[in-house]
Amino acid sequence: MAMDIKEKDRQYIMHTYGRYDVALKSGKGAVAYDDKGKKYIDVSSGIGVNSLGYCEDGWVKAISKQAATIQHMSNYFYCEQASNLAEKLCTLTGMSKVCFGNSGAEANECAIKIARKYSFDKYGGDLKGVRNEIITLKNSFHGRTVTTLSATGQDVFHNYFFPFTEGFAYVEANDIQAFKNAVNEDTCAVMFELIQGEGGVNILDKTYVKELVDYCNAHDILVIIDEVQTGVGRTGKLFAFENFGIKPDIITVAKGLGGGLPIGVCMCGDKLKDVMSPSTHGTTFGANPVVCAGANYVIDKVADKDFLNEVEKKGIYFEEKLLAVEGVKSVRRMGLMIGIELKKGDAHDIAVKCVENGLLIITAKSLLRMLPPLVITYEEIDEAVAILDKTLKENNQ
Ligand SMILES: *Cc1c(COP(=O)(O)O)cnc(C)c1O
């Protein structure tokens, strides 16, 4: 007899992820169906990737049309979809130039390279390099390449794959003095998430962020904001930095930008726009026209003021409903980026039970985490909360 999906997966795919016991087959909006036809409300959107939900009509049309026109051309040719997307991103963020890649980790790699080259060019360097250290925050997450693992400020990620890339230092978030103490003559940049997603939906303190950025600007320390998870409408603004009243030197974006196709973008401001020169960086699939067609569609939808206001309204509604659930202790939220602290019980066990009950939800550290598609409806929010409530009650939470 032929192997089923799960058996084949277990036999042939490296076991780098623990999976829920579900094979998803199709979806529309915030609703997904498994291979047996069972319906789920999805508040995870493929870890914040399906920003417009599953298979939004206009998005499907945009990528299908592009796939049938020209699907790839390499970066040795000009590409209309890519230059349109670059223009939109720069106009909407006040950044000057972008570099396209395929994932969040790659966008961060590019940011790290720009920061180090800027410093190398300006302050001089020998082959070992000087002024190349980047400060990141404890509890951060920046990706899975050897260098972005190094950048990630969590000891659990600094294992097995030695030697890691040198030149990173880690400080406690929300402690400006700790940051100033860590700065030395080799510091070239700071890189952080404004809301630590994987680290447990920790929203950074606004005053801290302002002070940090002012200090860095005064010392020519570049400010790299990792918006891989917080970008593209997730927090109720197009980018989270707008909620903090700062202007970063570099912004990295990925997850939600492609609407479900792989893309990573590193954007930089005026002072850095000419740092990278031919053959200092590149990636074969970067700026792929089909992916860019999808991203252009997503950006056009999400950058709309009314759309963004609706994201925040839905976030407030979601939070209110969640706080009324008996087993919920607290909610950390900005827009539709939501962390839920439970009064008791293990978040992962509860997530598994939620999935069994028809709610696709993820976790971050000891919290339940929701990154619903930005187009989730109020009725679907009600349904999601009802399933969570039911699940917590069934488990005596
Ligand atoms: C997911 C994530 C990354 C890594 O993105 P990949 O596309 O998985 O490489 C980096 N930074 C943050 C903040 C993320 O949430």
Image (cartoon, grey):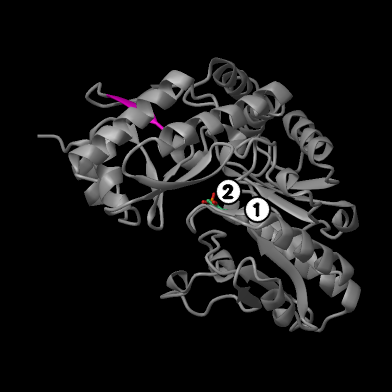
- In the drawing, does residue 6 fall left or right of residue 93? left
Choose top left, top right, bottom left or bottom right for residue 156: bottom left
Is ligand 1 less than 8 Å from the beta carbon at label 1?
Answer: yes
The span shown in magenta is 39-43
Image-based side of 260 in relation to 342, left or right: right
Q: Residues within 10 Å of mark 2 (few under 14, many from 20)?
A: many
Q: Residue 103 bears which disc, if any?
A: 2
As for residue 42 lying within the magenta part, the answer is yes
Say which quadrant the N terminus sits in. top left
Indicate which disc residue 107 carries: 1
Residue 280 appears anywhere in the view: no
Assess mark 2: CB under 8 A from ligand 1? yes
Asked whether the residues under the numbered discs 2 and 1 touch, taking CB atoms below 8 Å apart as contact, a structural biologist would say yes
Q: Residue at x 47, y 25 (%)?
A: 54
Residue 306 in picture, x, y percent from top left: 69, 21
Q: Is 66 situated above or below 105?
A: above
- Answer above or below: position of 200 versus 92: below
Please, what is the dominant secondary structure of the magenta stretch? strand
Relative to 167, is 318 on the left or the right?
left
Q: Establish if 60 lies above or below 358.
A: above
Give the residue type that dot 1 points to.
Ala
Q: Position of residue 359 (x, y in %)?
A: 32, 33
CA distance for labels 2 and 1: 6 Å
Q: Quadrant of residue 231?
A: top right
Q: Nearer the viewer, residue 264 or 170?
A: 170
Identity of the residue drawn at 47% across and 42% down: 47
Q: Amino acid at mark 2?
A: Ser
Give the quadrant of residue 27.
top left
